[in-house]
Amino acid sequence: MGNELTSRSVDYAQWYNDLILKGGLADYSAVRGCMVIKPYGYALWENMKDELDRMFKETGHVNAYFPLFVPKSFLEKEEGHAEGFAKECAVVTHYRLKADPNQKGKLIVDPEAKLEEELIVRPTSEAIIWNAYKDWIQSYRDLPLLINQWANVVRWEMRTRLFLRTAEFLWQEGHTAHATSEEAIEEAEKMLHVYADFVENYMALPVIKGVKTPNERFAGALETYCIEALMQDGKALQAGTSHFLGQNFAKAFDVKYLTKENKQEFVWATSWGVSTRLIGALVMAHSDDEGLVLPPKIAPLQAVIVPIYKGQEQKALVDEKVHGIMASLKAAGISVKYDDSDNARPGWKFAEYEMKGVPVRVAIGPKDIENGVVEIARRDTKEKKSVPSEGVAEYIKALLDEIQQNLYSRALAFRDASITEVNSWDEFKKAISEKGGFVSAHWDGTGETEEKIKEETKATIRCIPLNNKLESGTCVFSGKPSQQRVLFAQAY
């Protein structure tokens, strides 16, 4: 099968790519910078999407769908937004091809089919959505408007990596409109907590909640809230963002509402999103040199049963026993597969499901049936144990919960051990270059210092943690006064 992975300690980036490909999550595409999400990877995305969608609906949001194409003039209406996305835009200029008269079988752009206005393939949907909101919002009775969209977007990235940064990716984007700034800020913060809840409780990945610096904010936002996670190589990854957009888009698209006092006011806005980048985070946070390690709550397959037998008579015996076990597992809500295919030996299958990160593996043969047991192996610790086949569904259900908790606890211990507090520039540089992880340091609050630190160390301010404690000090770079520590890290 060629299951060997590059070791994390040898080449972390190559290990990650090997794992995505050999774990069956995605493949490279014929289109530069784009990926093919394979069925196993898409099943993982669907599980994540289903949970998030449920959480969004529980908080009062509804789904809608908006066009893939954004008229260029719409994008230009909010200046900061336009400038922020200009370099990543794919532009449609024509709507037809025609046969090349000079080369048989070739097609050329029909010069007579030029669009009156160029269209942008959406890098994000604020512009097209706020143009629609202008017609949907008339009075305070229409607010709040809480809409989410599941879609694909295109950002023409020059350096791409499977799941982490691709020219096209899948995501959700929430776009809400409110009567007051307080309501909009409350919404932006609420959605940040929803993201944190999902990433911690389903992905088993601890996050730090915070706000971005002005330099790192979303283009067109007054405030960007974020959740930051730490990968095993000590680099940070932004796992989700939520933005308070103020009235910027309402003013750009003239979206007003009639108040109870019969006054015309501009509405207040938020937007928030997570993408298939979460799959990259999941892979890098938990997996090992033998393959994927997936949290049971979102794994496409929670358990696999592999039969051990010689000849059809033994297989029939095992099949009968497995039939009952499968029924009890499914009744307990566990997603399970019985791999009785005869195209590979059990050892090959064990390696395959280890590579795919299936949380629990069950092996059963005639001797196990005779002894009334099954062998259970857990993917996170690789421990094997013989357990009574009677009540195996309850055992596996409890084991899945234990694996989920263990993955979170392991990631949390690693994250907490990877936060270094520093008080000087030399300590800062040493921590970033030698240890990695998050570096907690004083910063003078200026974009100029932030940029210089980034130039010298490639470390950026990942966030100013929410409810950050005030603490007088001096900036590690400039020596100027500082009122709080912020978290720096090198990042994806």
Image: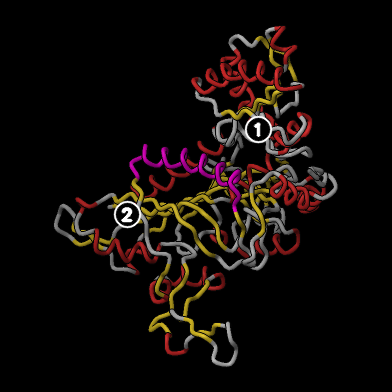
**If you read the primary sequence from the N terminus, does the residue marked by circle 2 or circle 1 appear first?**
2
x then y, percent, for residue 136: 24, 59
Is residue 182 visible to the viewer in this orientation of the structure?
no
> What span is in magenta?
37-61
Say which quadrant the C terminus sits in: bottom right
Q: Secondary structure at mark 1?
A: loop
Q: Residue at x 76, y 52 (%)?
A: 13
Q: Which mark is residue 284?
A: none
Residue bearing the label numbered 1: 358
Q: Residue at x 63, y 31 (%)?
A: 408
Please give the residue where the numbered disc 2 appears in the rendered image.
Answer: 177
Residue furthest to the right in view is 10
Is the magenta region chiefly helix, strand or loop? helix
Residue 379, how many percent across, how many down? Answer: 70, 29
In the image, 186: left or right of 266? right
Depth check, front residue: 280 or 180: 280
- Circle 2 crowding by C-alpha within 10 Å: few under 14, some 14–19, many from 20: many
> Residue 283 falls in which quadrant of the image?
top right
For badge 1, the amino acid type reads Val
Q: Element type at marker 2?
A: strand
Q: Quadrant of the N terminus?
A: top right
